[in-house]
Amino acid sequence: MGLQQSKDELLYQQVTNANTEAIKKLRTEGAALEVFIQFHSLADKEGKTPLILASTNPQLFDVAKTLTELGANVNAYRSGHHAGTPLHHAAQSGLVQMVNLLLSHGANALVLNDDCQTALDVARLKGNSNVVRAIESHICLFSGWLHEVCEPGFLTCVLLSLEKWVVVVPCGQRKQSKPMLLELAIYSGLQDAKPRTIMALWKANIDESNLNQPNPALIISSSK
């Protein structure tokens, strides 16, 4: 047991050293990517698994790629004050390349951390617009430009048409067995990380019949 654990800890150390070849070698020798001692994951003093550790550092992208290719759990969850999955941590750090890597390997973008935030929520709060766009493009049911028409004011005699970027995305839920809840997020522009407005669509009817047309449209109406 002691020998096995030392290999696992050594693999974790090689993550910090960015030594992908050593990680592969240790894996072939039986080192685990997530070690369980008394049914609890072995982690560093801050509670990180090897992949979570790699997901917080842009210099460790190749290490994260190696770990995912070796079968590391992309949805491993870390509890506590800095809780979340590797995707939460990559989103908080603003690492869009890391976020795309994790999503491409099956990371669940709807997992809630201990603060009831998805990785998308974390990216919005941190102002990481590139990460926001990456996650939204992966999970959204619709995205496009909303044309907002402003009526003439006292000093104007023309109509103004303002474009807003909108997305319809699912919300994170504790119980995945519940029906999927959707929200409409409206941004002033593509460079914004934080939505101007978020509208719950929990009681709305959504018509997606026009999404395959040259000029796709999404029709949202109130359900009775």
Image (cartoon, rainbow, N blue to C red):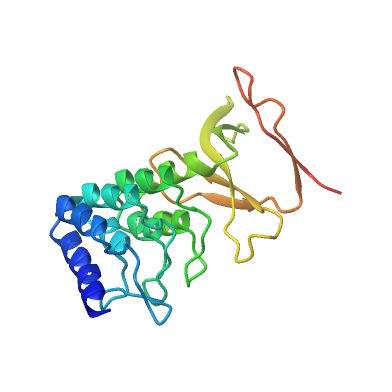
Left or right of 22? Residue 91 is right
The structure residue drawn at horizontal position 29% and vertical position 53%, both measured from the top left corner, is: 67
Instruction: Please name whichever residue, 181 or 36, is drawn nearer the observer in this view of the structure.
Output: 36
Q: Quadrant of residue 27?
A: bottom left
Residue furthest to the right in view is 224
Left or right of 171? Residue 50 is left
The structure residue drawn at horizontal position 59% and vertical position 26%, both measured from the top left corner, is: 159
Q: Is residue 101 above or below residue 16?
A: above
Where residue 220 sits: x, y (%)? 72, 39
Query: Is residue 132 at least partly visible in the picture?
Result: no
Q: Quadrant of residue 179?
A: bottom right
Instruction: Please name whichever residue, 157 or 189, is drawn nearer the observer in this view of the structure.
Output: 189
Q: Is residue 121 above or below residue 222?
A: below
Left or right of 8? Residue 101 is right
Where residue 189 sits: x, y (%)? 44, 38
The structure residue drawn at horizontal position 53% and vertical position 44%, both measured from the top left corner, is: 139
